Amino acid sequence: MKFKSDVIWALLLIVIATISFYLGIQTGHFETEKALDITIQQKEEQISGLEQKIHQLSEELTSRGIFSYPQATVMPGKNNSAASVLINLNGKDAIKNLEIERRLIRDYTDTAISPSDFPRRGTKTSIGTLNAHNPVAFEIGSFKSEMAVDLIYRSQGKKWHQYIRARKTPSGELKTFWVITNDESEVIDKHIDEGFPVNEEGEFTFGANRDLKYSEIRMNSIFHPYPGE
C-alpha cells in the first residue's frame, strides 16, 4: 500500500507544482501587463512632450530663423515714472535703412483716449542700419502705472508692427506684453512677462473696449489690434 501512497503523493506534488507554475505564469503575466501599461503611458507622455517641443521649435523657426526683424524690450528707467525702450535685432542679417515710428499713450486705461488715436501721435526716426552690435534705445518718462507703445518699423519696402503694453504690478515692478506682426498682419513673435497683471480669466486691457488673452494669440495668425482696422 506504500506504493499507492507514494504514487498518490507524487501525483499531488505534480498537481501542486502545475498549479503553482500556472499561477506564477498568470501573476507574471499580470505584472508584465501592468508594467507594459505603465511603460506605454510613460511613452505616450514622452511623445506628447516631444510634440509640444517640436511645435514650439517650429514656431520659433518660423518666426525667428527665416528672417531678421526688430524687437523692442521695455525696461525700468532711471526713476519710478520712467522706462527705457531698447530695440535689438532679432536674427542674423542686419536691417538697413531702418525707420522707426513711435506712437505712445501714457496711462491709457485711465484716460478717455483710445489707442485708435495712435495714427495722429507718431514720431518718426531714421536710425540707419540695425545690427546685433548696434541696438537703439529711447526713454519714456512721466507715466504713472502703465503705457501703450506702438512701434512701426520700415526698411526697404518691409514693415513690422510691435504692440507693447507695459504695466506696473502692485509692488511697483514693470511688466510687459508685446506682439510683433509682419506687413501681412501675421504674428511672428509674442511675449508676456511672468506676473503681468491680468484678471481671473487671464485677460488684460489692451485698449478702449478691447481685452486680450495671451494664450489666444497664435503664431502666424492675423492680428488686428484695433476694431475697424
Image (cartoon, rainbow, N blue to C red):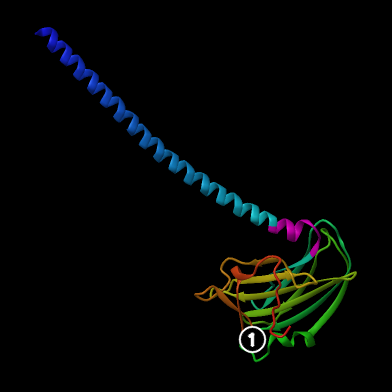
Which picture quadrant has residue 120? bottom right
Residue 143 location (% of width, % of height) = 66, 82
Query: x and y percent of residue 179 in the render?
Result: 69, 70
Q: Quadrant of the C terminus?
A: bottom right
Position in image of residue 132 (x %, y %): 82, 58
Image point (19%, 19%), residue name: 12
Residue stretch in magenta = 59-69
Q: Residue lying furthest bottom in this view?
A: 112
Q: Which secondary structure dominates the residues rendered in magenta?
A: helix
Give the quadrant of residue 71: bottom right
Mark 1 lies on a secondary structure that is: loop
In this view, the residue in front, 5 or 46, is 5
Of 198 and 168, the residue lying toward us: 198
Q: Nearer the viewer, residue 72 or 160?
A: 160
Residue 173 against residue 10 in the figure, above or below = below
Is 66 colored magenta in this rendering?
Answer: yes
Say left or right for 151 vs 158.
Answer: left
Task: Give, as a three-letter code, the residue at label 1.
Answer: Ala
How many numbered marks appear?
Answer: 1
- Where is residue 173 shown, x and y percent of the image? 59, 71
Which residue is under mark 1? Answer: 208
Crowding at label 1, few (<14), some or many (≥20) Cα neighbours within 10 Å? some
For image coordinates 47% across by 46% down, the residue present is 41
Q: Quadrant of residue 28?
A: top left
- Whether residue 29 is situated above or below residue 104 in the rendered picture: above
Q: Is residue 40 left or right of residue 173?
A: left
Placement of the N terminus among the 4 image quadrants: top left
131 sits to left or right of 145: right
Q: Is residue 112 above or below residue 217?
A: below
Residue 147 within the segment the image draws in magenta: no
Query: Compared with residue 181, is residue 55 higher up or lower down, i.e. above or below?
Result: above
